[in-house]
Image (spheres, rainbow, N blue to C red):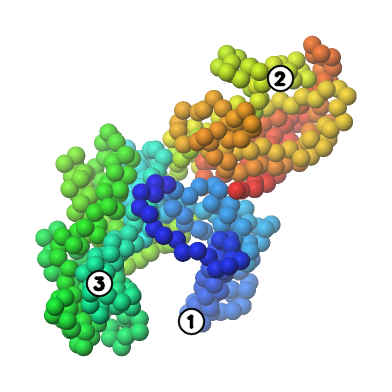
Amino acid sequence: MKRSLSRPIPPLPPNVTLEQAYTDIMSYMFRHTREFFESRPGYINTNTWSRLQNSMEIILATPNGWDIREQGFLRRVAIRAGLINSSSAETRLTFITEAEASIHFALHHGSIRNWLREDAMFAVVDAGGSTVDSTLYVCKSAQTPIRLEEVASSKCVQAGGIFVDEQAEVILKQKFRNSRFGTSDYISAMVRVFELKAWNPVIGSSFTYYSQTKRLFAAGRNSNVIDFGGPGDTDNAVGVRRGKVSLTAAEVASCFAVPIRDIRDSVRSLIDARNIQYLVLVGGFGESSYLKQELESAFGARGVSIVVAEEPSRKAAAEGASIWRLTHNVKARAARYTYGTNFADVYNQKYCERSDLKITNPDGRIVMPGAFSTWVKKDVVLADDFAHAVPYAWAWSSNSSSILSDLRGYSTKVYMWDSAAPPTWALDRQGNPMPGIRHLCTITADLSGLYSSLTLCNGPSGQYYQVHFSVLISLGGTQLSARVQWDDKARLFETMKGEMSYD
């Protein structure tokens, strides 16, 4: 995720971890969701919720820039918060990117079906409060059910609507620094009204105001009023009259400048030289008239039309996630990173820089530890049912006493690399990840079932035991899963899904 905008993050209270904070928030939301349904006639009663709670599915929509590591964190949080239990987490908790949820929302509520054709390529930009996610799709079937595939790995940039609000706060503080309206209470009230979308009460006030300063601002709009106070809030010297202050078009435009620049650059890097005709703009920040105008200015010359959702009051990601669960219109996704693990590869000249580290296996092969074993390359489009089997061999000397314990404690680390060209090395000479290599998770499994498949072989240095197995990687859906398979006397065996621990 690109982070070109800095936003100070307040520290957590003493002795409160990030996981505890997320747990409390998720528990609070789940508890009030239940209370909402149970307290309203026509929804469901207490008995219905209790009867269905242990079988309900939880779908979490996350930014494009979040990956499998963040999913592991949220899975732990959901268990701690009581949404699910650990035994059902894999089947009852699923993840979807906000961009994919948004395209399902747009398909359901927007005008996409009017222009969507087979082989049509289009971009979806989900502009939210904090992040802006951009994804490129190609239509494989425009007939019901619609079938879409990702074209390339999606983009995520921290350039959402909150950064417009923060710049507005900077301008207002400067404007009122020498007046009574420069206090934190007044500035907070002004910013709150600046970003409101409709009729809303200002906290601590008996007045109700209608203000859409940020949402309605557009090029050529000279009246940009922030209606933050009452009749007694007047100071002609600083331009405040009866609780209203006006910002010039240049002042409001400057609030948008950096976020729009970063969104524009992110979208440009995604579509590159590809021929697309439509850009679908969704999300809360996507309702901004000025953002739409700026994207039209940036991409209109190349024939791109900006399309907005027709139900702006709805939550695109939340509702889209539910629609996704029922329809699954996206059938293939592009890998966002190159995934793989470290292994001891057969020594060859590309490893000569570390020739002093090569070792001889019990089977007599000269191998180089720390090499990168590629499982999936970045930008490769993976179908929903994609599974990739990576073969491995494990050898022990014939007098080894650790074979069974090694099999029971099998583990392999999964790494991410942000390039389509796989690196040579996963680990440096000291066994640490190379620069640019990120540890994603560790897969552990009990492979003691392989013990009966041990084969006694003859090698250059004497007899040794060997087993062959494959790690089966599934990345085609919205989550990573792994299994280990092996053959034993013409019968195929498979572990249950490997347990994954995340950093």
Looking at the image, do the residues carrying marks 3 and 2 touch, with CB atoms under 8 Å apart? Answer: no
The residue under label 2 is 359
The residue under label 1 is 40
Which amino acid type is marked by label 3? Answer: Arg
Q: How would you rate the neighbour count of disc 2 (Cα within 10 Å): few for under 14, some for 14-19, many for 20 or more?
A: some
Q: How would you rate the neighbour count of disc 1 (Cα within 10 Å): few for under 14, some for 14-19, many for 20 or more?
A: few
Furthest residue in direction front, as rendered: 178
Query: Residue 69's spot in the image, x, y percent?
Result: 55, 48
The residue under label 3 is 177
Looking at the image, do the residues carrying marks 1 and 3 touch, with CB atoms under 8 Å apart? Answer: no
| Quadrant position of residue 427 | top right
Q: Is residue 228 above or below residue 442?
A: below
Q: Secondary structure at mark 3?
A: loop
Q: Is residue 146 visible?
A: no
Of the residues tagged 1 and 2, which is closer to the observer? 2
At 41% from the left edge and 40% from the top edge, which residue is drawn?
153
**Separation of marks 1 and 3 at Cα, in angstroms:** 48 Å
At 16% from the left edge and 72% from the top edge, which residue is drawn?
246
Which amino acid type is marked by label 1? Answer: Arg
Q: Secondary structure at mark 2?
A: strand
At 46% from the left edge and 40% from the top edge, which residue is drawn?
336
- The one of 364 and 379 positioned closer to us in this rendering: 364
At 27% from the left edge and 46% from the top edge, which residue is drawn?
264
Query: Which circle's residue, 1 or 3, is located before the other in the chain?
Result: 1
Q: Secondary structure at mark 1?
A: loop
Which amino acid type is marked by label 2? Answer: Ile
Query: Which circle's residue, 3 or 2, is located before the other in the chain?
Result: 3
- The one of 380 and 244 positioned closer to us in this rendering: 244
20 left or right of 188?
right
Q: Is residue 205 above or below residue 485?
A: below
Query: Residue 474's spot in the image, x, y percent?
Result: 57, 40
372 left or right of 486?
left
